[in-house]
Structures are given as C-alpha cells and as structure tokens.
Image: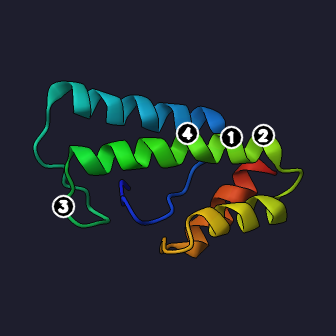
Amino acid sequence: MLGHDCHSIVAGADHADGIIAELRSYIEKGYDLILTSHYTPEDLKDAQTKIDYLENLKKIAVNCADADSFKAEVQKQYSAYSGKNYLDMTAGFFYA
C-alpha cells in the first residue's frame, strides 16, 4: 500500500528498503498515476512522500529501544496519519 498519509505495514528495515526501491523505480519511470488496491490514486509526489516516511521510520527505529517508544515517536511525527493498526504491526516487526 502506498498511502501518502497512512501508515503502512513494514516488516523491518530490509522490507522498507524493498518498498523504497520499488517506489524509486516508479519515479525513474515517470509514472503519472499509481493505482493500488488499498488506497486512493496517487502520483510521484506521493511516492516520494512515502519514501521519505520509510527512510524516517528506519531512523526512528534505530533510536528507539522498544515498540512502545517507536510507536510514540512515529505518532508524534505523523500525528495526522491514519492506519494506527498498521503502525502496531510495523512495530511488532521491528521489535519482534
């Protein structure tokens, strides 16, 4: 799921890197429109927003000791994002 203003289920840093690589390929190919089965139509600006989010998630994870502090920091920085249940799942993957 792309979702420029929604948390995603991210199964750790390696998974984040895979998503980032895929989104960068969309940007390199110059796709005008990105359609997913789980969110609204999005564009390359949205892809870059998600890349920035994923890069920041990885940084937050490095600086947090556990899932609760990770979730608190992500929610602080992305308070308007929907999909809190996705954030819970992501925290579970980063801090298994």
Image quadrant occupied by the N terminus:
bottom left
Is 6 located above or below residue 46 in the figure?
below
Residue drawn at point x = 48 percent, y = 74 percent: 82
Horizontal side of residue 60 vs 66, given as left or right: left
Residue drawn at point x = 21 percent, y = 56 percent: 42
**Amino acid type for the residue under numbered disc 2:** Val
Residue drawn at point x = 29 percent, y = 66 percent: 39
How many residues crowd mark 2 within 10 Å: few (<14), some (14–19), many (20+)? few
Question: What residue sits right under mark 3 in the picture?
Answer: 41
How many residues crowd mark 1 within 10 Å: few (<14), some (14–19), many (20+)? few
**Amino acid type for the residue under numbered disc 1:** Lys
The mark lying in front, picked from 1 and 3, is 1
> Residues under labels 1 and 4: Cα distance?
7 Å
Res 22 quadrant in image: top left
Question: What residue sits right under mark 2 in the picture?
Answer: 62
Tag count in the figure? 4
Res 73 quadrant in image: bottom right
Q: Which mark is residue 24?
A: none
Horizontal side of residue 78 vs 68, given as left or right: left
Of callouts 2 and 3, the N-terminal one: 3
Horizontal side of residue 10 vs 32, given as left or right: right
> Residues under labels 2 and 4: Cα distance?
11 Å
**Quick one: SS at disc 2?**
helix
Res 72 quadrant in image: bottom right
> Residues under labels 1 and 3: Cα distance?
28 Å
**Quick one: SS at disc 3?**
loop
The mark lying in front, picked from 4 and 3, is 4
**Quick one: SS at disc 4?**
helix
The mark lying in front, picked from 2 and 3, is 2
Question: What residue sits right under mark 4 in the picture?
Answer: 55
Question: What residue sits right under mark 1 in the picture?
Answer: 59
